[in-house]
Image (cartoon, helix red, strand yellow):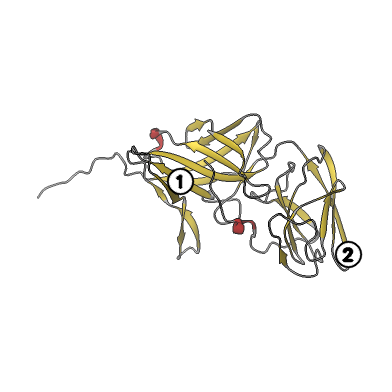
């Protein structure tokens, strides 16, 4: 039950750092990094031009390359101030040097911590906060399948906010996206006050470094309203994102006569 998701959410708004800093590509936390997870480096003179990688992801882009513990990293995007890349498979746990070399010979270095699992969830606003990035899969009693958005754009606020999820009489599945959790032995998701074991958590399959979590929605959430989504993988907690279950579902309408 996997669904393609545009990779545009990987390109966040401008973030300024005095020197190069690496953050998780979903949460934007500066924590540990898991092999085959998405990372973002911010700095200066990281590349001589801006360029986006194709499929498969290249190891050199606009003349820039990244190594993690000496292993070349696949590149999503490079620019003078930002590089999006995938932590290579096979990088050992512990301190790992990261080196970004640009086409003009500029070399920028830092050190990160590698761990088997470092979970994070993508958000629709590409800032690690607010409504979750993903889709709702609705399966009717006749077996019909329909995908719906978890977010809607609010023009007044100029950002994405949670769309109402209407349970109805169908079976619903949440398909949410993250990174850094595919190696986890145990994944739990708490939605509001309900803790759920996902039907699937692992590699999304279409995009390097992207993980997918499939969750069957219990009917008890049908009128829960605004809820936090908290994912825990091998005891490590990801950034919190949000959803909204239509609070009017199952609530009788009271008509008062004159």
Residue at screen point 75% across, 65% down:
81
- As helix, strand or loop, the secondary structure at mark 1 comes to strand
Pick out the residue farthest to the left: 258
Task: Name the residue: 49% across, 48% down.
Answer: 135
Q: Residues within 10 Å of mark 1 (few under 14, many from 20)?
A: many
> Residue 239 has which mark?
none
Residue 147 appears at what percent x and percent y? 44, 49
Pick out the residue farthest to the right: 105
Residue 63: which quarter of the image? bottom right
Q: Is residue 227 left or right of residue 80?
A: left
What SS does tag 2 mark? loop
Number of the front mark, 2 or 1? 1
Numbered circles on residues, count: 2
Taking the spot 77% from the left edge, 70% from the top edge, the residue there is 49
Residue 84: x %, y % from top left: 72, 56
Residue 103 location, quadrant: bottom right
Residue at mark 1: 136
Judge the density around disc 2: few (<14), some (14-19), many (≥20) Cα neighbours within 10 Å: some
Asked if the residue under mark 1 is in contact with the one under mark 2, i.e. CB atoms within 8 Å, the reply is no
Image quadrant where residue 252 sits = top left
Residue 179 is situated, as x and y percent measured from the top left of the image, at: 65, 44
How far, Cα to Cα, is label 2 from label 1?
A: 45 Å
**First along the sequence among labels 2 and 1:** 2
Determine which residue is flagged by label 2. 106
Task: Compare residues 16 and 232 and report the one nearer the observer.
Answer: 232
Q: Position of residue 73 (x, y in %)?
A: 79, 51
Q: Is residue 195 above or below residue 38?
A: above
Please name whichever residue, 240 or 68, is drawn nearer the observer in this view of the structure: 68
């Amino acid at each position: 039950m996997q669904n393609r998701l545009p990779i545009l959410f990987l390109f966040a708004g401008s973030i300024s750092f005095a020197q190069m800093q690496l953050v998780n590509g979903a949460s934007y936390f500066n924590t540990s990094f898991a092999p085959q997870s998405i990372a973002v480096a911010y700095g200066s003179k990281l590349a001589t031009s801006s360029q986006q990688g194709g499929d498969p992801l290249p190891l050199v882009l606009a003349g820039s390359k990244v190594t993690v513990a000496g292993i070349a990293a696949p590149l999503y995007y490079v620019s003078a101030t930002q590089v999006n890349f995938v932590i290579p498979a096979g990088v050992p746990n512990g301190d790992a040097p990261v080196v970004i070399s640009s086409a003009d010979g500029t070399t920028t270095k830092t050190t990160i911590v590698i761990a088997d699992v470092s979970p994070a969830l993508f958000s629709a606003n590409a800032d690690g906060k607010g409504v979750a990035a993903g889709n709702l899969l609705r399966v009717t009693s006749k077996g019909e399948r329909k995908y719906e958005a978890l977010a809607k754009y609010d023009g007044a606020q100029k950002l994405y906010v949670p769309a109402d999820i209407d349970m109805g009489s169908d079976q619903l599945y949440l398909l949410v996206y993250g990174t850094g959790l595919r190696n986890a032995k145990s994944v739990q998701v708490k939605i509001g006050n309900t803790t759920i074991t996902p039907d699937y958590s692992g590699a999304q399959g279409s995009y390097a470094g992207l993980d997918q979590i499939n969750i069957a929605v219990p009917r008890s959430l049908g009128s829960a309203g605004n809820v936090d989504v908290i994912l825990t993988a091998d005891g490590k907690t990801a950034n919190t994102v949000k959803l909204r279950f239509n609070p009017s579902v199952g609530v009788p309408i009271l008509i008062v006569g004159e």
